[in-house]
Amino acid sequence: MYLDDDTSFGFDNWQNGFEGHNSLGGWLTYNEIEYLVFPKIVDDGKVQQDLKHISEMINSVGQFTMETNEEQLKSVCCRD
């Protein structure tokens, strides 16, 4: 899922889209987010994200476990 600048908290496009209208036949419920992946290169190589800046933004709101390499930043949200 890609989020653009017009997407706001509350997932305005997500609530009215996939959650209620999907191939699974009904509304989806979630218990937790396991992880979020931020790839360095998106949109077929047209966009290159600043992973260091993304990491700094995430860490500005709290302490999260991060796994990073040259290709992506992975924010681990829930561990078993």
Image (cartoon, helix red, strand yellow):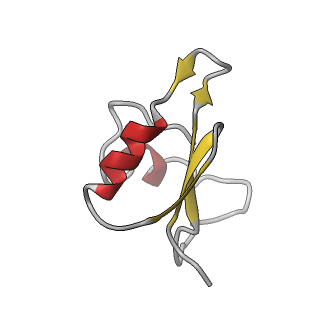
Q: Of all residues shown, which one is farthest toward the bottom? A: 80
Q: Of all residues shown, which one is farthest toward the right? A: 23
Does residue 6 appear to the left or right of 71 in the view shown? left
Name the residue rendered at 53%, 23% in the picture: 48
Q: Position of residue 56 (x, y in %)?
A: 33, 47
Q: Toward which corner of the image does residue 45 lie, by quadrant?
A: top right
Name the residue rendered at 48%, 38% in the picture: 51
Q: Position of residue 10 (x, y in %)?
A: 33, 55
Q: How many numbered markers are drawn?
A: 0
Image quarter where the C terminus lies is bottom right
- Vertical placement of 76 versus 37: above or below? below
Q: Position of residue 16 (x, y in %)?
A: 45, 49
Name the residue rendered at 30%, 51% in the picture: 9
> Which residue is nearer to you in this view: 35 or 51?
51
Image quarter where the N terminus lies is top right
Name the residue rendered at 35%, 68% in the picture: 63
> Which residue is nearer to you in this view: 1 or 74?
74
Does residue 76 appear to the left or right of 69 in the view shown? left
> Which residue is nearer to you in this view: 34 or 6?
34
> Which residue is nearer to you in this view: 23 or 2?
2
- Vertical placement of 1 versus 45: above or below? below
Q: Position of residue 66 (x, y in %)?
A: 51, 59
